[in-house]
Amino acid sequence: MYRELPKLVESVDSDPNVKVLVVRGAGTKAFASGADIHEFREVRGDAESARSYNEHVAAAEHALERMTKPSIAMVHGYCIGGGCGLALACDLRLSDYEGRFGITPAKLGLVYSLESTKRLVDLVGPAQAKWILFSGLRVDAERALRIGLVDSLHTSEELESATSEFASTLASRAQFSVTATKEIVRRISAGQAEDDRETTQLRNSSFDTDDYAEGVRAFLEKRAPKFA
């Protein structure tokens, strides 16, 4: 799965007919329940094989995080370990009330990567990140919402329709605005605090787009915009 994800994400990102990616688990029991620990002796049996495995994990998370289009993790039930790492790499996370989140390196004698740890810290802050990582305990859906690990909660029956409705909202917006904003937020998370040539160009070039003209025209005509 980790090996295949970057290629799938690239195909989504290059498809002009796709505006939003929704990542979900099969069925409604789990988003992803984590790696199969029984495989660890084979796929992570020594430092070299562990390095290769970790590189595939990092590449999959990078692909999700760096795609130009927005991504939503739709979380039914368990979201544990590497599964939680994939959800953190998405832009937004919607969960049902059965959502259970956990990152468990301390229960296995492992160390979470700096980049993966940073995604968690960026969302919940240092103290909550330490609580989650030091203890390896699961966080229920309501606490996850309270600390910022997820963005909204829904019943299990309503989660798919709520996610689809929100994805449709994102798809209806000016896509240049959405992708440019995602890039600017990424730069802020990476430590950039002031505009540079690239971010200034992103902002200024928006005034030359058809979407900008349509947005202003729709506002003045008191109707919903129809972006290209």
Image: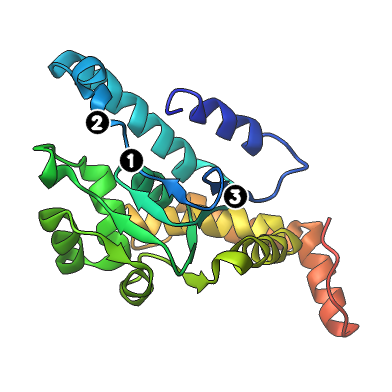
Q: Secondary structure at mark 1?
A: loop
The mark lying in front, picked from 2 and 3, is 2
Q: Nearer the viewer, residue 68 or 221?
A: 68
**Residue at screen point 35% across, 65% down:** 149
Q: CA distance from mark 3 to mark 1?
A: 19 Å
* Left or right: 20, with 135 as reference point: right
Q: CA distance from mark 2 to mark 3?
A: 27 Å
- Which residue carries the number 3 mark? 22
Q: Quadrant of residue 164?
A: bottom right
Give the answer, above or below, for where 110 lies relative to 164: above
Q: CA distance from mark 1 to mark 2?
A: 8 Å
What colour scheme has been applied to the protein in the rendered image? Answer: rainbow
* Left or right: 96, with 35 as reference point: right
**Residue at screen point 65% across, 51% down:** 20
Q: Nearer the viewer, residue 125 or 165?
A: 165
- Which residue carries the number 1 mark? 34
Asked if the residue at tag 2 contacts the one at tag 1, i.e. Cβ–Cβ closer than 8 Å, the answer is yes
Q: Secondary structure at mark 3?
A: strand
Q: Earlier in the sequence, mark 3 or mark 1?
A: 3
Q: Quadrant of the C terminus?
A: bottom right
The circle on residue 188 is none
**Residue at screen point 35% across, 60% down:** 100
Which three-letter amino acid code belongs to the residue tagged 1? Gly
Q: Is residue 191 visible?
A: no
Q: Is residue 144 visible?
A: yes
The circle on residue 37 is 2
**Mark 1 burial class by Cα count in 10 Å: few <14, some 14-19, many 20+:** some
Which three-letter amino acid code belongs to the residue tagged 2? Ile
**Mark 3 burial class by Cα count in 10 Å: few <14, some 14-19, many 20+:** some
